[in-house]
């Protein structure tokens, strides 16, 4: 009974803080601020102030997390609405996704060498652009640490959602499908939230890129590792 | 009342597809791991394309879910307050690595797709 009350209170808290963050986001229009990050930071501060642990918050949090499964399923809707444009660009899309996987591998390898990162952590970062369940599986095959991978996936997703508008403006990316493929293949479902916000076509491409990137990453690991 | 019933049916359809996705995923798991939600996405796409499921049968609920998708990522992000301890020693370096890599990957992937699309459009003209 008390657990139930705790869970509902934390869900309510999350809704209120998220509403507030949307308002802050609209008001100040700072590119790298995004409502998910603002909400998470405020909630962490509140939990720390009142001496709650993450496992207290997780009682409510896990109910919200469980909705992520069906949400990924409905990404099929924008995909369906834009299926003709996406099919027409099959080769550019596959090209973009392969470019993304190669860039991930090269950049993580070079940067980890540069910063002198442990082998285990390096292996755990390689799948950071892939949606969580696929990333965990990739890390298992590579022999990394799964918990580090989950953390890396979330940091990457938040980064992707935050920097997507900047990358697209500075990079002068005009085509909506190209925008979505870049966002989805770099920052999975969390980035896709930003792509959907931009327009439906970019959202559709991003959802598609997320699936294809995950699949090709796992296949690449099976072949090369 | 009718509206509530309609939304309930829509939610049930979406969950049923999600569960079907999970089932297929667990059956395939010893060959290749594809998450149930991704398989569910493919199943829904096939049902819509084959006209077995009409878009209107799930439209309100799915657009609501997609509109507030970001909200459901908040608890995972709050989880950083625990899991950062795993990489405490090199957290700053790792965050820098992830940010640089993410921006680079996104830029390269956008650019390659963009160039390939405009190349294809030109060659068709």
Image (cartoon, coloured by chain):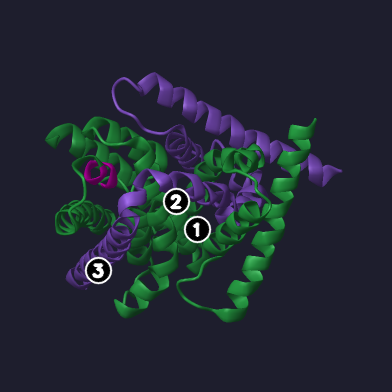
Range of the magenta residues?
A: A121-125
| Prevailing secondary structure of the magenta residues | helix
The residue where tag 2 is placed is A189
Asked whether the beta carbons under mark 2 and mark 1 sit within 8 Å of each other, the answer is yes
The residue where tag 3 is placed is B111
Q: Are marks 3 and 1 on the same chain?
A: no
Q: Are marks 2 and 1 on the same chain?
A: yes
- Disc 1 is attached to a residue of which chain? A
Look at the image and tell me in which quarter the C terminus of chain B lies: bottom left
For numbered disc 1, what is the local secondary structure?
Answer: helix
| A122 horizontally vs A64: left or right | left
Q: Please tell me which residue is depicted at 22% across the width and 34% down the height of the picture.
A: A142
For numbered disc 3, what is the local secondary structure?
Answer: helix
Please state which of residues B5 and B15 is positioned toward the viewer in this rendering.
B15
> Badge 2: few (under 14), some or many (20 or more) residues near its Cα, within 10 Å?
many
The residue where tag 1 is placed is A193
Question: Which chain is tinted green?
Answer: A
Q: In the figure, residue A8 lies in which quadrant?
A: top right
For marks 2 and 3, give the one nearer the viewer. Answer: 2
Asked whether the beta carbons under mark 2 and mark 3 sit within 8 Å of each other, the answer is no
Q: In the figure, residue A86 lies in which quadrant?
A: bottom left
Please state which of residues B96 and A26 is positioned toward the viewer in this rendering.
B96
């Amino acid at each position: 009974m008390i657990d139930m009350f705790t869970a509902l209170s934390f869900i309510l808290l999350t809704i209120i803080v998220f509403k507030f963050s949307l308002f802050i986001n609209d008001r100040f229009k700072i590119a790298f601020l995004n409502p998910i990050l603002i909400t998470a930071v405020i909630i962490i501060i509140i939990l720390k102030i009142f001496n709650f642990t993450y496992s207290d918050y997780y009682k409510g949090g896990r109910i919200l997390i469980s909705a992520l499964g069906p949400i990924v399923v409905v990404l099929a809707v924008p995909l369906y609405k834009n299926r003709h444009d996406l099919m027409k660009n099959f080769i550019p899309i596959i090209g973009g996704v392969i470019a993304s996987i190669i860039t991930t591998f090269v950049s993580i390898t070079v940067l980890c060498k540069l910063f002198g990162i442990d082998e285990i952590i390096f292996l755990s970062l390689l799948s950071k652009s892939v949606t969580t369940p696929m990333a965990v599986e990739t890390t298992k095959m590579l022999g990394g640490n799964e918990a580090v991978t989950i953390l890396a996936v979330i940091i990457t997703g938040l980064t992707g959602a935050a920097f997507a508008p900047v990358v697209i403006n500075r990079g002068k990316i005009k085509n909506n499908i190209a925008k979505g493929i870049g966002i989805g293949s770099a920052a999975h479902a969390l980035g896709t939230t930003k792509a959907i916000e931009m327009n439906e076509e970019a959202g559709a491409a991003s959802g598609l890129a997320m699936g294809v990137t995950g699949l090709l990453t796992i296949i690449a690991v099976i072949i090369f590792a | 009342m009718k509206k509530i019933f309609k939304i309930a049916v829509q939610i049930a359809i979406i969950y049923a597809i999600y569960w079907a996705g999970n089932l297929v995923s667990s059956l395939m798991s010893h060959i290749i791991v594809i998450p149930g939600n991704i398989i569910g996405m493919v199943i829904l796409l096939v049902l819509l394309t084959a006209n077995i499921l009409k878009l209107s049968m799930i439209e309100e609920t799915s657009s609501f879910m997609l509109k507030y998708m970001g909200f459901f990522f908040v608890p995972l992000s709050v989880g950083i307050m625990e899991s950062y301890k795993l990489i405490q020693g090199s957290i700053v370096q790792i965050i820098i690595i992830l940010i640089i890599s993410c921006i680079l990957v996104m830029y390269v992937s956008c650019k390659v797709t963009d160039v390939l699309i405009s190349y294809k459009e030109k060659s068709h003209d």
